Image (tube, coloured by chain):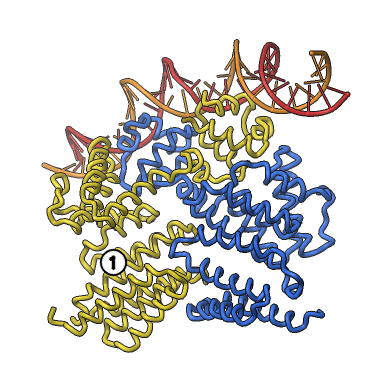
Chain colours: A blue, B yellow, C red, D orange
Amino acid sequence: MEYGVTLRKIRKQKGITLKELADGICSISFLSKFERGDSDITLGLMTRILEKLMLSFDEFLYVHHDYQPSKLEIFFKSVNTAYMSRDTVQLEKLKNEEIKKWKRFGVETYHWNAMMIQVLGQILDTQFTHEELKENNIRLLSDYLFRVEVWGYYELALYNGTLLLLEPDMVIMLSRTAFQKSDRFKEYTKVKDAITAVLFNTIIYLLGPVNRFHEKFIYQKEIGEFISYLENLALSEDNLLERVHLLQLNGVYELRIGDKEEGIVKVEHAINILKELNSTKLANNMEQYLQQILYYQENPQL
Amino acid sequence: MEYGVTLRKIRKQKGITLKELADGICSISFLSKFERGDSDITLGLMTRILEKLMLSFDEFLYVHHDYQPSKLEIFFKSVNTAYMSRDTVQLEKLKNEEIKKWKRFGVETYHWNAMMIQVLGQILDTQFTHEELKENNIRLLSDYLFRVEVWGYYELALYNGTLLLLEPDMVIMLSRTAFQKSDRFKEYTKVKDAITAVLFNTIIYLLGPVNRFHEKFIYQKEIGEFISYLENLALSEDNLLERVHLLQLNGVYELRIGDKEEGIVKVEHAINILKELNSTKLANNMEQYLQQILYYQENPQL
DNA sequence: TTTAAAATTGTCATATAGTGGAATATTGAT
DNA sequence: ATCAATATTCCACTATATGACAATTTTAAA
């Protein structure tokens, strides 16, 4: 379906005539032609038209695609859904699609996409096939991330998906890079949320798996660094969820360095707030995580 | 500055060649021409190019405009800022800009914008000038809102800005309309947030000004209705801020219908959660609102 | 229903988006 | 520095986006 047809729908809704909308931008006859689907339109003109309608491009495209999210969002969402539901078959399918595009066009973007899926697949199943993707995958991918000068939503989502498979030192460097190189997007909600997610994941990763909580802890300084990044970022008072998570992480951090009582108090505080707000699932997840930590700390031999 | 130049920057960053990016979409030579700013590009081609780069239109434009939000966002933001800081001079200026565009193009959109600013200005200062805007402003504006079949971000923001000046019955009908007619945007964060804001404002409006809390309360049923909308909407567990606000509003509602103890408990609970999460300003505002209610309930003669 | 004004579409001219391939510039290995 | 390979630009050409204005349809008032 043509963009113009969507535009006409919206224009009619707003009770604006062709003449009024075209005035100062393009000719009436052309706008009519475009709206009937008989012509494409230049990006420059379209920008001015949407501006006049007080409409953002993304909102327009959302309507145009019959109220479906963009392909970009669908991609990350479907990968995430497949991973969360441990559906390796679906992951395989998604991976193959990306590999096909990679081979077809040679664009590395598709390569990274495939790698990300591969990495997720391997977490679920060590047998996850990877004929096309060699050993040095992760290396290539992190090279790319170091190389890019500005991280947008894509780079952050990509990194977030693969972070778990990297060495701690690499994660520390890349997460720093992520924070610095996405700096300019601080006002752009979607990207800001992605940065926040990266920082949270980094901290959880550096705390280590719960069954190693009795081992010596060496990332004290780095965790402090990333927590301070988070505090700067999510500083707006409205981000209550982020604040609850920070409270929890501060607690887990204290548990990790052996400050048991303090740690339990903080984590339970976070859990209680969630419960009070009826966010039961989140509360239960947090509760379970705490229980695991306590269990392993009492049975360090496991 | 040209769109193409921005595109080239991004492409280079990602280490993709002209050939790779153009392949399957357009010719290499044309892409080169576009990237040098020697040609505009068709919307259809641009869509496919951005898709290949895993980039949304809005993110691309955000980068293109040197990491500034779109004009649409700037408009609502600057109006809101001027209103919040009670800067009637700035409001006047913004209004005149919109009126100028309205007269220039005849597009009603600019008319509604001007009306919205007029309404806000009148709240701050009853002398706020309005040569151009007649008495029946509000009537025209609400006619428009009733007429439009699908409410997007623009309609919601517009309504939110003017709701306070409408009659209660009108607000009830329009807020219902808003909720129903923006239904299809439920997955689109920005619009969803706007719907949420409308519902909250509606409830607060229907509760009435605090110095009338002793009068008979007649919107019991409607408030219940809007709260249930909110609960359906913000049902995702992550929306902690919305959940805190709901808790507060439930409390205020009970205060309003005379259930004093219950009401105070709930509102204070909401306040406490905010305090525990260091959202001091939000907590203080809520506290102040509660104190006002209690004050007027004890001195109904004022 | 008639009629005049307003809104939209059709026709044709032209500017410019977009192509293919040759010419040039860049890159990277020896 | 030289050379081959690759990436980009230039140029002549074609397709199509866009404009001017006439023809038609729609709207709304009498």
Which residue shows up at 70% across the image and 39% down it? A107
Corner quadrant of residue A104: top right
Q: For the residue carrying disc 1, how many other residues have a C-alpha within 10 Å: few (<14), some (14-19), or many (20+)? A: few
Which residue shows up at 62% across the image and 30% down it? B26
Residue A250: image location, x then y, percent: 59, 71
A48 or B93: nearer the viewer? B93
In the picture, measured across the screen, residue B19 lies left or right of residue A273, that is right
User: What is the quadrant of the C terminus of chain B in the image?
Assistant: bottom left
* Secondary structure of residue under mark 1: helix
In the picture, measured across the screen, residue A167 lies left or right of residue B241, that is right
Q: Chain of mark 1?
A: B
Which residue shows up at 40% across the image and 65% down it? B196
Which residue shows up at 75% across the image and 75% down it? A214
Q: Can residue A277 be spotted in the picture? A: yes
A174 or B255: nearer the viewer? A174
Q: How many marks?
A: 1
Corner quadrant of residue B178: bottom left
Residue B57: image location, x then y, percent: 51, 43
Residue A258: image location, x then y, percent: 68, 77
Residue A42: image location, x then y, percent: 47, 32
B247 or A32: nearer the viewer? B247
Q: Can residue A71 be spotted in the picture? A: no
Q: Is A81 above or below relative to A181?
A: below
Q: Label 1 is placed on what type of residue?
A: Met
Disc 1 marks which residue? Answer: B173
